[in-house]
Amino acid sequence: MNEGGPQTAHPGEPGRIEDISATLGALSGLPLLVIGDVMLDRFLSGEVERISPEGPIPVLRIEAEHTALGGAGNVLRNLSALGAAPRFLSVVGDDAAGARARELAAEATAAHETADAVLLTDPALTTTVKQRFLAGGRQLLRADHESRRSLTEPCAAELRARALALLDGVRGVLISDYGKGALAPALLADLIAAARAKGLPVVVDPKGSDYARYRGATWLTPNRQELRDASGIETRDAEGTVAAARLLIDSYEIEGVLATRGPAGMAVVAAEHPPEHLSAEALEVFDVSGAGDTVLAAFGAALSAGSSPLEAARLANTAAGVVVGKPGTAVAKPGDVLRAAQARRLHDVETKVVDLNALVAEVRGWQSEGLRVGFTNGCFDLLHPGHISLIGQARAACDRLIVGLNSDASVARLKGPSRPVQDEAARAAVLASLGKVDRVVIFGEDTPLRALDALRPDLLVKGADYALDQVVGGDLVTGYGGQVLLAELLPGHSTSETLRRLGA
């Protein structure tokens, strides 16, 4: 079901809070080059109280107006909010919007003395302005003022010279391409080649369907539609997303693709590793404006600071979940990210424990997306290293892991009247707190046969102290085409032995 073997996915696992805190700490003062198309995002908000007599359209009574940097400028804002020290390069027109963009860029870099923003002026350009009209916090209309023209030769030459000169003082390069004219193919080729020659990661938020212009970059961060347009492969499910990303990796000599999939989360596809999948972090979506900019900023910064691609993607996933819960092109600050990670972890623990009927529908949805669903089961009375090893091996072999948990009555029948030590609610909560466990389902029978028959997982995992023909439900799973995996056991670990040593 999975391309290239089992995926080691971690849906809903933003990483430990201390890990995210360490990653955020590494971003403080981090010098990064940010180059791309800057624009203004203008928000006009108010109330709709009537329909126009001139036509069947709402009349917006404007009560407030807010202007923020957009496009590459929003990447700058997010980096500054995260504590980095960006060096920003872009081009604006000789107009009022360009002057305002220059003011806002100066404000965005004021927090760190080594940060800087240079916005060149090209009289051939019109500074892009995106106006959004909102009522009740929701968009009614967006109107864009823009021109898509190539830079004049003197401006293009100066932009190239400044970009190459900045490479000696930065740890990474972030390219925000909105297709507005600032990033000519020749500039991209020279900048990517020079940065890679210096060992600098180059992360690109791409635009258009011709990704040859990004050849040699380290990572790309397309959304689902951009990935489909560039690859020609449908990206509705996880399998298609991975296939499309692999095609780009092979075609354009890049190391990996971080594909954003909206409500379906993210796919982390690296050239040399199995793909990883992260589920969406937002608990509530208010406005998706600028979420891709936040992903580029957080992922590119963390990668440049030395994080692994998966760690960087987890930070980006959490940061994106923060900004889509805010109106407008918002930013995620370190405190926001840490609070969101903690809130998501608590939310996951509450929502991972589900009843069998609800879980059946969820499993069918996962499988329709091409995800491999695994199942393991047990009493899990006192969680010990043997349990953790079993769950880790099971999780590495599938995309979603369900743990079937014996009820209190079931445990008492199997283990004796003194068991369980912890009731089923406590045992379920402990299992649900593990990042590698996606769902916990409690069953009252002595065996999980009824649950297995209803769920029909792709993989059943038990410890290697069983023979294949002894695994309860093994014949059921293999009968419909599933697999049974016997996981290696850690010697010397069992709940009964632990209780014996405690004298219980």
Image (cartoon, rainbow, N blue to C red):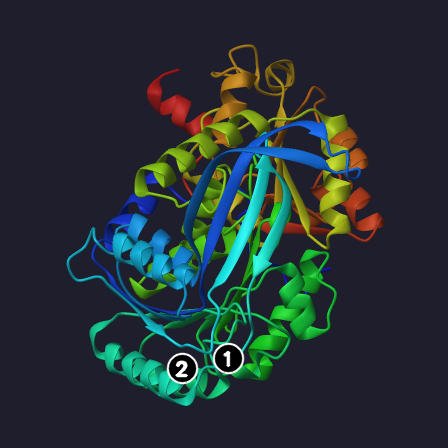
Mark 2 Cα shell of 10 Å, populated few (<14), some (14-19), many (≥20) = many
Quadrant assignment for the N terminus:
bottom right
| Residue 453, placed above or below residue 81 | above
- 11 or 428: nearer the eye? 11
Q: Which mark is residue 135?
A: none
> Residue 447's quadrant in the figure?
top right
Mark 1 Cα shell of 10 Å, populated few (<14), some (14-19), many (≥20) = many
Amino acid of disc 1: Tyr
Give the side of residue 375 with respect to residue 53, left or right.
left
Examine the rendering and report whether any part of residue 485 can be seen: yes
Quadrant assignment for the C terminus:
top left
Contact flag, marks 2 and 1 (Cβ < 8 Å): yes
Q: Position of residue 126 (x, y in %)?
A: 48, 69
Q: Secondary structure at mark 2?
A: helix
Which comes before the other along the chain, label 2 or label 1?
A: 2
Amino acid of disc 2: Ile
Q: Which mark is residue 214?
A: 1
Residue at x 48% of width, y 52% of height: 41
> Residue 159's quadrant in the figure?
bottom left
Q: Which residue is mark 2?
A: 192
Q: Secondary structure at mark 1?
A: helix
- 362 or 400: nearer the eye? 362
Give the side of residue 59 with respect to residue 454, left or right.
left
